[in-house]
Amino acid sequence: MQIVGKSVFRTLYTPAKRSRKGQNGVLFVVGGSEKYHGAPLLAAKAASKIVDLVYFHSPAQLNHEILAKIKGEGDCFITIPAEEVFAVAEKSDCMLVGNGLEVNGENKLLVNLLLKMFPSKKFVLDAGALHLAEKKFLRPGVLVTPHPLEFKALFGVEASPAQAKAQAKKYGCTILLKQVFCFVTDGKTLAQNKNGNEGMTKGGTGDVLAGVAAAFACKNPLLLSAQAAAFANGFAGDRLKKRKGVYYDADDLVGEIPLALKKLGG
C-alpha cells in the first residue's frame, strides 16, 4: 500500500502567470437543503480558494438566499436557477454534487439526470448524492467520497480499504474512503493518507475536503486530486492543531487551506 505524501503536489496543476479568468478551473456545486444549508457553502468556499469560478445551485431556495448575501463579500459564487443548471453544467470543468442534499425522489432524478446527460464530465459525489446515485453511472470520470455508512449505502458492502479497491475496480470510478485515515483508490492502486487529527471529527470538515477535491479535479486527474485533497485537508488540520489544539471548526479549516497549499507548493 502506498502512503500519500507531499510528492503529490509536484505534478498538481498551478495557474500560468498570464492566465485569464476561467482558465484555472470552473466548478459547479449542486447541493443543500433547508436543514443542511451550510454544507455546500463550506464546500464552495473551500473550492473558491483554488479555482477561478464557482457556480452554485440548490433545490432549496433558502440556499440561494444565503449565498446571495455571501456574494456581497466578494465575487466568489454565482447562484444558478433551475432553468440554467444544464447550461452551466456543460461549461463547467467538474461538478460537485451532494453536499447537504436531501435524499428524496426529486433530487434522485436530478443527480442521475446530470450523470446521464454529461458522461464525459468529471463528477465528485459526496453526502446525499451517495444515497441517490445509481451505480450504473459510476465510471472513470467519477470520484466518490464516502464515509463508511455512505460507502455501504452506495455499494451494499461494509467499508474497508480492500472493498474500496474492489468496488473502484468493478465500477471504474475513483474512491476516497473517509475513515480515521483516508484511503484513495482507482481500483489499480491503493494509497493511505495518514495526517489529520481528532479535531477534524467536527461537522463540515468532510464538506471542505469534497470542495478541495472537486476544485483540484477541475484541472487534474481524479486520483491525483483525491490524494492531494486528502493530504492538504489533513495538513491544514494539523497546522490548526498546533495553534489552537483541537478547538477549531470547518470555517477555520477553509481559511487554513490556502496557507497549507502555499506551504506544500501547490
Image (cartoon, grey):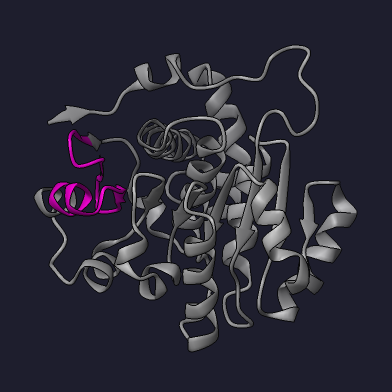
Q: Nearer the viewer, residue 226 or 254?
A: 226
Is residue 264 shown above or below 244?
above
Single out the residue that lies furthest toward the bottom.
Answer: 105
Looking at the rendered structure, the number of numbered marks drawn on it comes to 0
| Residue at x 52% of width, y 16% of height | 265
Where is residue 162? Give x, y as percent.
9, 49
Q: Nearer the viewer, residue 205 or 243?
A: 205
Where is residue 21? Give x, y as percent.
80, 31
Q: Which residues are magenta?
A: 165-191
Where is residue 39? Give x, y as percent.
57, 65
Tell me if residue 256 can be seen.
yes
| Residue at x 53% of width, y 74% of height | 101
| Residue at x 38% of width, y 49% of height | 143
As for residue 172 lying within the magenta part, the answer is: yes
| Residue at x 56% of width, y 37% of height | 218
Where is residue 38? Give x, y as percent.
62, 67
Tell me if residue 249 can be seen.
no
| Residue 165 shown left or right of residue 73 in the figure | left
